[in-house]
Image: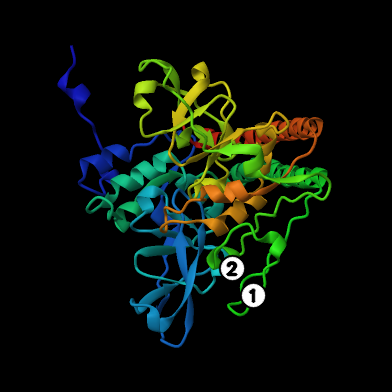
Amino acid sequence: MTTITSRIDFVSFNDLVNWSVRYLRENRSRYKNTFSLVRIGDFLTRNRNIIEIQDDILYTRVTIRLYTKGVLKRDEEWGRNIGTKRQFIVAPGQFIMSKIDARNGAFGLVPPELDGAVTTADFLSYDVDTSRINPAFLTLVSSTKEFLAICQSSSSGTTGRQRVDETQFLNIKIPLPSLSEQNRIVAAYNARIAEAERLEEQAKQLERKIEEYLFNELGIVEVSLVPNSGRLAFVNWRTVNTWGVDKLLRGGNKDILRSNLFPNRRLAELAHINPHTDFKSLLDNFPISFLPMECISDEYGEIEEFRTGIKAHSKGYTKFQEGDLLWAKITPCMENGKSALANNLLNGYGYGSTEYHVIRSQSPSFRISFLYHLLRAKAIRKDAVNYFSGTAGQQRVPKFYLEGLIVPHPPLEKQIEIETRITYYKSELKKLRVFSRKEHQQAIEDFESELFSS
């Protein structure tokens, strides 16, 4: 039988810094007993360096990314345009947090480039006693889920505008190893992060190599566009693919993939853009693939998740069939590279977002899988932005952009050769990114294992 005392939660009087039951209960952490628990306020001193904003001075302002992603420059603004005249000057190495977003991990250290920047009272900045704590160790502790949970319980106010209570925050206790132990823990964390960053840099280099290889093999010289000066402008007749002053002067260049080695054709001559896909022969409950936009990886340009739908639910969606190319036309999906080959579809058919352009080969001598690599090139995604139509936030690449795009048409064997090489490069790229993320995750897990019980 459960006794009443088994349900009673006792709190030491020394820990009674707040009468909130939620705060008192959530302030119990999984920290190991290996290290002493010390109040944050014991090694943080509030920055009181106040300044009166002057109209004729240009000030640098601060922003803090959520989930301890860094302290950055927000902008520069003349004093005359700053409403709050009483602000605080921050210095490099200070620990700073947003009172509003502390519950979402808006903490960090002020970097050297923000020396002398200003903040409002909604940002709390502190000098760190480096004889007791390594500032990097403090930042790592503040990035843990347990610490964020305590900060959330230390916040009050209406939803979305909750501010952390500074007294409660400074009374939060964290494990404090010796300074030499802190340095060892931070060094081990940094070593893994450095390896993760090294692998990510290799991945970026390989990404650039893929596009360089593609353009070199096809004899494509990327054209540098001259921005419109607002004065008299001349357009080369050879590059006129679309009538309209707005299109010609916005800097677009649908000749961007023109090859010096192979024949060139308009894409509309080689492929159907948004062709009709006939579902009439399918029964209403016939299972087929359903691929909304979130099923496609923008990073790798592949289908990450196959969902099952039925013909009866396809009304109002974009329809496609096995082997088609799905190319996102809306911002920011297009710029991010959301496109994929619709392979391995359930029963050979599928439907999905209305924001896809569907591209289907109309010639056995032109492989859609070859075109897929061309249309994922950053040069194309950058160029296509110049042809956006629609309202802000809902801008799309029109069908005519793809129809008029000049593309190389090499022999079939050359297309296959290029596909094979790029597919290999992409598999290596994926491995590098997987290893990089594992290193990053391991760095976090190793750090947490030093402090928390399993």
Residue 349 in the image: x percent, y percent? 49, 22
- Residue 69: image tag: none
Say which of 146 and 306 sits in front: 306
Q: Amino acid at mark 1?
A: Ala
Q: The residue tagged with tag 2: helix, strand or loop?
A: helix
Q: Residue furthest left?
A: 4
On the image, the x and y values in percent for residue 115 come to: 54, 71
Label 1 element class: loop
Tell me if 28 is positioned left or right of 390 in this view: left
Q: From what the image shows, is residue 233 above or below residue 276?
A: below
Query: Looking at the rendering, in which quadrant would you find the N terminus?
Result: top left
Q: Residue at x 76, y 34 (%)?
A: 415
Number of numbered discs: 2
- Relative placement, left or right, of 382 versus 97 is right
What residue is at 49 percent from the left and 36 percent from the top?
451
Residue wearing tag 1: 233
Please give the residue where the numbered disc 2 appears in the rendered image.
Answer: 249
Q: What's the image's color scheme?
A: rainbow
Query: Is any part of residue 170 visible from this angle?
Result: no
Where, by quadrant of the figure, is residue 322 drawn? top right
Looking at the image, the residue that sits furthest to the bottom is 56
Q: Nearer the viewer, residue 9 or 385?
A: 385
Query: Can residue 394 be seen?
Result: yes
Q: Is residue 202 left or right of residue 62?
A: right
Say whether residue 454 is left or right of residue 29.
right
Amino acid residing under circle 2: Leu
Tag 1–tag 2 contact (CB < 8 Å) = yes
- Residue 149: give x, y in percent of width and height: 35, 41
